[in-house]
Amino acid sequence: MTIEILDWIASEVSVCTKCALHESRKRVVTGEGPADAEIMFIGEAPGFHENEQGRPFVGASGRFLDQLLEQAELTRSEVFIANVVKCRPPGNRDPQPEELGACSEYLHAQIESINPSIIVTLGRISMGTYFPGAKITAIHGQMQSIDGRFIIPMYHPAAALHQPALRPSILADFAKLPDQLNEARAVLGRHAVRKKKTAAHQKIDSPRQLSLF
């Protein structure tokens, strides 16, 4: 049933006209990943490349995210990736409150359907869904239980492209994901898996492309 629910959400999003973003979008970006994903990443909004392809995180920040996932012993095919809004805001500006509100039911339905062990918010806009008023500099990488779900706020991968000084923090946060996942599994009564010894310290090249658009 989960796959059917996610397909239904995608079909609803594709024709959504609840806010003004539908007027300028090229393609909606509902999200992608397995219906039984244990980790769900929630970004902020589609950018230029996402709007062109209809897929999340396919630009420069997406390539860096793939490398970060590899460090955490994960692949894109194992996680579900979505955004708080499904259409690109003009000029890649921050989503406005009415736009966030219009998309919230879609995101909530995805979360309820997938029921991940961990939700990772990427960036301050996404973080605000669970930590309103908090500063990402103070809580990034720290897993907290909120309303029965484990949430980890993290910097957006794009932060490393624009602010190289944040790169060590982003790498360190992702390195903790395997242990945090097993911690969440233990509490939720789900089976833990052993970490891959050969992937314990994978080297990630510094992101070189500074333009996201």
Image: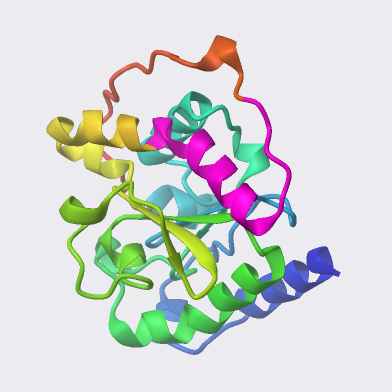
Q: Is residue 178 magenta?
A: yes
Place of residue 64 in the rendered image (x, y in percent of width and height, measured from the top left): 39, 32
Q: Work out whether residue 81 or residue 146 is closer to the camera in this orientation and state it.
A: 146
Place of residue 200 in the rendered image (x, y in percent of width and height, measured from the top left): 49, 16
Residue 210 in sight in this render:
no
The residue stretch that appears in magenta: 174-194
**Displayed quadrant of residue 136:** bottom left
Q: Is residue 173 above or below residue 102?
A: above
Q: Work out whether residue 7 or residue 50 is closer to the camera in this orientation and state it.
A: 7
Q: Residue at x 28, y 61 (%)?
A: 92
Q: Is residue 81 above or below residue 129?
A: above
Q: Residue at x 47, y 52 (%)?
A: 50
Left or right, 13 with respect to 174, comes to right
Q: Is residue 202 above or below residue 192?
A: above
Q: Residue at x 33, y 30 (%)?
A: 171
Quadrant holding the N terminus:
bottom right
**Outermost residue, right direction?**
1
Q: Is residue 50 magenta?
A: no
Q: Work out whether residue 16 or residue 145 is closer to the camera in this orientation and state it.
A: 145
Left or right, 38 with respect to 171, comes to right
Residue 67 in sight in this render:
yes
